Structures are given as structure tokens and as C-alpha cells.
Amino acid sequence: MPLSLNSRILIAAGVVLIAFLGAASYGIDRSFRATSLTAVHERLKAQIFMLLGLASFDAPGSAPMPAALPDPSLSTPDSGHYAQVFNADGGLVWRSRSMLGFAVQPPAARPPGEFVFEETVSSTDEALFCTSYGVEWETRGKAKPRLYTLQACEGRQSFELQVQGFQRSLWLWFSILTVLLLLIQTAILRWGLTPLRAVAIEVRAIESGRQAAITGEYPRELRPLTRNLNALIAARDTHVQRYRNSLGDLAHSLKTPLAVLRSALEAGRFDADSVHTLQEQVAQIDDTVRYQLQRAATVGRNAFAPPVEVAPMVERIAGSLRKVYHARQLTIDAEVEVGTRFFGDQGDLMEVVGNLSDNACKWARSRVGIRAHGLPLRPGQRRQALEVIVEDDGPGMPPHLVERALRRGGRLDESAEGHGIGLSVVRDVIETGYGGLLSIDGTPNGTTVRAVFEFD
């Protein structure tokens, strides 16, 4: 089972935090060790300078250093601080009292005036840090100065104890800091993911039927999700309601024609009037079934529908109509703004444009125009509404007949082909399926039909 978002983020943040603090503590530890080592070197250099200030190599046979040294650790056996002086041949000239009972190997010959810091081991296997310094000493009565090497040493144990104490303190505080940061991150994540949990609760409530849509106020990152979920739920409810209404209307519309057919069949007379009546009722049933099926099949707007390019579809419809009405030599112009897109079912757009264009061709004298373009975005709107305009230069539709033409079966001229359901289906697709608007403007010089599709 996949881990929850909370667990994923916590694990990832914990791993990153531990790795970061581990790397930081390692870096701090190395830095402290280097700083402590530098401090040891500086202390040993200071001891050498002190010994140089006290040394006296002028009188042969006299003590090169005073018996009492300013640093008492050099006079205390096994104190961890040691010093000695060698001549040019490596012979021991002097050593501190703290070196009682063991010896340190003399350093290698070095040029005078150069400090050499190194690690070594005493004769008792004690690890030491040592700094050596060569000096040329001019004595009275000697033409040539003598070369001496001064060496100051310090036991490594105190250094290691200092580093270990710092490491324990460092890891303790870093461990406490890691736990605190993880607890803070957990609290922040729980607070940050609260809107997601709230959405999940609302979705479960919708599934169980306790509410119809997501109603909470959520951060802007979640608003597209909640808006699209609500749109999906609304589309589902609209489709279900449309199917229910269509089935109910179909059942109601078929009652009368079926009753007439039943009466005619029970009468047993099939003269010319009866046959005509039967034909009329069968045609009415056919019209009703076609209309309700088309109405129920309307898909409507869909928040997740991929965009459909309008220009190729409109041009295809215009090309088909040019062939159908070739004998009348109609001029059919199609003009679609570049980049115009339809966010819905392709069949719905073909139904609307096809019906409106076909009606225009039936009534046009010489010209039909089909235009489509996107409308400017309104505040809060994500997708442009689509406007389709179909014009013809026919006799025009009087304003008082517009509503009649939009009703199912409404036909202004019984001699024209068709069943009178085209405009009503178009109106239902636009207004019910897409929340848009269908308007008809008729003048003596022609008719203009405007269809506006809304997608938000």
C-alpha cells in the first residue's frame, strides 16, 4: 500500500534533515579538531620562545637552562608537557624534569629559523605532539656559531579528551535539535495538509450522499481541484437529470399518439382517413423519439474536456453544405478567428453549427455566413466563451415568431423540409448543456443567429 503524503514528506524531510545535520556536525567536528591542533602548535611555539629567552649556551659546562622554569608543568614528572635541547650532532644538551624516566627521539636536522610540527611516540609509547626549532647561537670566543635544536612536546591524550568531550556535546545537542525539528516539521505538515484532509472528508460526504458539492474555502493551490470536482459533479447531475427528463417527456409525449393508434386499431377500419391518421401519429412518434434521443445525448460542458479546434470543423460543415446546395449556387462563407477552441463534446458543436447553417441555407437567397470567435475573458473566468454567428440574406424571421420557432416541432413554413426539432435541439444543447444563450435577430434583409457557449 502506498505511503500517505504526510508519511512521504516526513520521511523525506527526516532523511534530508539527518543528512544535513550529520554533514554539518562532521564539518564542525573537523573544524574544531583543526582549531585545537593549531592551538597546540601555538602553545608549543610559545614554550620554545620561553626556552630561548631563558637559554644560556655561552659558558661551557654551565647549565643551559635555569633550574626553576616559569612553566611548572615542565618541572613536574609525567605532566604531559616536555622540553629538550639538542646540539648539531643530535646529542642531548638539556631536558626538562618532566621527562624523568623516558626519552623522546631527537628531531631530524632542519635549517635554522624553521618551526617543524610533527607527531611522535616516546620511549614509553606515549603519543606526543612536538614542535622543533633550530637556532644558531653565537658564543664568545668562537668564530663560528653553534647550531642547537629546541623541542617542546605535549601529550596527545589531553587533546583527544578535549576533542571527545566536544564531540559528545556536539552530537547530544544535534540529536536534540534533530528531534525538535522533526516534531516541528510534523506539526507544520499536519497544519499544511489540513486543507487536503478537509477535501477528502468532503469527498467522502459527497460519496455517502450527505452533501452535493464541495463547499469549503480552500487555499488557491487547491481551488482548481475543488472547482473541477464541483464541475464534474454538476455535469454528472445534469446528465442524469437530462436523461430522466428526456425519458419522462418521451413517455408523456407518446401517450396521445399511442392512444390514437390503439383506437384506430380497435375500430378495425383502414380507410384513407384512418391510414392518414396512422401515418401522422407514426411520424409524430418518430419526431418525438428523435428529439428526446438528441436531447438526452447532449454531453454539455466538461471541465476536463480537451480543446477542439473550431476552424477545421466549421470549414468541413461549410464544404458539405456547398455540395448539398450546389444547385442553388449559394455562397457559403466560413470565417473563424485563429486559435478559437471549443471546450466540450465535438458532436455538440457539430449539432449546433450544422443545424443553424442548414436552416440558414434553406432560407437564404444567395449568401450564408458562418463566423466563430472567442469572447474576452471575464474576471475569474479560465476559458474563453465561444460565440458562433450564422447569417443569411433570406426573408428574415419576424420577432414575434422567434419563440415559436424555438419550440419543439415549431415550423414557420410547412412546405420546408424537416421535422421542426432542429432549433429546439440547438437551444437545449446551448442553454441546458453549456449554460449559454441562443438568440435570433430577424430583419427583412435576413436573419442572424447568435449562439454563445460558456465553459466555466
Image: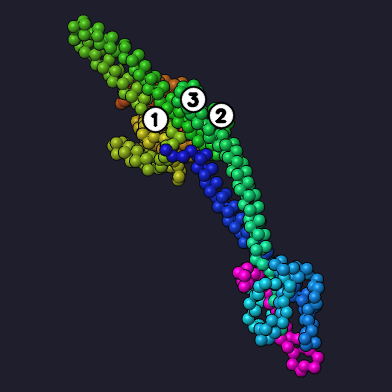
**Residue at (38% x, 39% y) in the render:** 314
Question: Which of the two marks, 3 or 1, is nearer to us in this view?
Answer: 3
**Residue at (74% x, 90% y) in the render:** 145
Res 296 seen here: yes
Residue 131: in magenta span: yes
Residue 86: in magenta span: no
**Residue at (57% x, 36% y) in the render:** 190
Q: Amino acid at mark 1?
A: Val
Instruction: Look at mark 2 in the image and give the residue it sits on.
Output: 216
Q: Which mark is residue 299?
A: 1
Cα distance between the residues tagged 3 and 1: 26 Å
User: Magenta part of the protein: which range?
Assistant: 119-147
Q: Which mark is residue 425?
A: none
Cα distance between the residues tagged 1 and 2: 28 Å
For marks 1 and 2 on the same chain, the one whose residue lies earlier in the sequence: 2
Question: Which of the two marks, 1 or 2, is nearer to us in this view?
Answer: 2
Instruction: Look at mark 3 in the image and give the residue it sits on.
Output: 205
Q: Give the image's coloring scheme.
A: rainbow
Q: Residues within 10 Å of mark 2 (few under 14, many from 20)?
A: few
Residue placed most toward the observer, 10 or 258: 10
